[in-house]
Amino acid sequence: MSLEKISNAGVSVWLDDLSRERMVRGGKASYLPQLIENDFVVGVTTNPAIFSSAIANSELYRDDVATLHSKGLNAEVIISELTTSDVRQACNLFLPVFERTNGVDGRVSIEVDPRLARDTEGTINQARELWNQVGASNVLIKVPATREGLPAIRTLTAEGISVNVTIIFSVSRYQAVLESFIAGLEDRVAKGLSIKDIHSVASFFISRVDTEIDPRLKEPEHQSLRGRAALANARLAYEHFMKVESSERWRALAGSGGNIQRPLWASTGVKDPNYSSTMYVLELVADKTVNTMPESTLSAVSSSADFNGDTITGRFSEARETLSQLADIGIDIEVVAEKLESEGIDKFIKPWIELIAVVERAKA
């Protein structure tokens, strides 16, 4: 089973989905405890689109919406109550994993309001609120990797809040994210505070890069570059991770009990049917990484007999050559990343606004 093999290779398998249906035996979705027990799932990520779909399509939220509405709460407060309740319940399910892995896994993520992506102080304030509202040691607060999000990452880390940094599309932004995390730990150490319980992941988005770049490869001589940009981009991010982890600066923090921020491969569901449905998992295997998958991808990997070991660390030169070839034909990965970041924020804002409307209708 490929899931077992990639787990043994150092990849933490997380599910990119959460709903009450998953936490109720006999629900429409796969039962989360069974995925934990049988499919090597050791964490969960959520986002506004996931919660919008969960709440809009399940009867399991109706009574809570009615009760909260009867207390005079508005739609946004109701949504906060529903989502933090689900995350808290999932955190409880993952507590054995959390304890067994000394806090590395057994993590459940919840995201700040995507409308705050360009608001540093707003992000910090809501992250604090979510951290306290969930009240679980194994929650991760998702913070966007926008320029405005970078100082929030540093501040929250310095305060002892574990973060999942999301919407990363370029190596340069990933470098800035890892720098912000490390600086936050250093700020905390300088105050004589413990850093041993702080964990973090950096969510590097994969499939959207190929979805953006592949349509630009129209000439016959460019076809060999299709489906290669996203993997190359991610592999170079991991190369930077390795350099930082082996640095004197990081060793000093590790000596103080620090836990390195792990790269997390997100958006790993394949969009192009011509590609293998397991491509963004089996081609991104390396130690100390996380791969968060939609259930369809998880099932595909579970059914696959393919496994090629570490598919990252020996391919850095190949990755640089791929991005160089793309640059030669006018495709700049940094420009692509800026576009995808802006679109990514919008893609989370839209379902969040739709969710507010769903709750408003439910109240009525």
Image: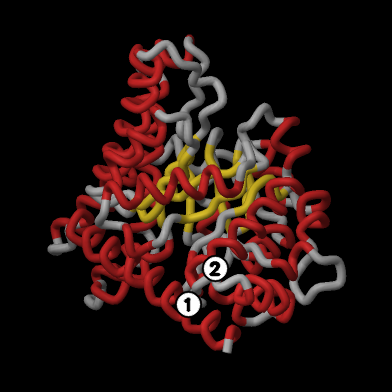
Answer with left or right where residue 350 lies relative to residue 213: right
Q: Is residue 161 above or below residue 107?
A: above
- Counting from the top left corner in percent of width and height, residue 62 is at 69, 79
SS assignment at label 2: helix
Residue 105 lies in quadrant: top right
Dots 1, 2 in contact, CB < 8 A: yes
Answer with left or right where residue 338 lies relative to residue 318: left
Answer with left or right where residue 110 lies relative to residue 24: left
Q: Which residue is mark 1?
A: 356
Residue 334 lies in quadrant: bottom left
On the question of residue 54 being in view, the answer is no
On the question of residue 303 being in view, the answer is yes
SS assignment at label 1: helix
- Counting from the top left corner in percent of width and height, residue 237 is at 36, 41
In the rendered image, the quadrant that contains the C terminus is: bottom right
Q: Nearer the viewer, residue 229 or 197?
A: 197
Residue 296 lies in quadrant: bottom right
Mark number, residue 279: none
The structure residue drawn at horizontal position 63% and vertical position 71%, both measured from the top left corner, is: 68
**In the rendered structure, which amino acid carries the disc numbered 2?**
Ile
Q: Nearer the viewer, residue 218 or 66?
A: 66
- Counting from the top left corner in percent of width and height, residue 161 is at 48, 35
- Rounded to the nearest angstrom, the CA distance separating label 1 from label 2 is 7 Å
Answer with left or right where residue 205 lies relative to residue 361: left
Q: Which residue is mark 2?
A: 79
The structure residue drawn at horizontal position 70% and vertical position 53%, both measured from the top left corner, is: 90
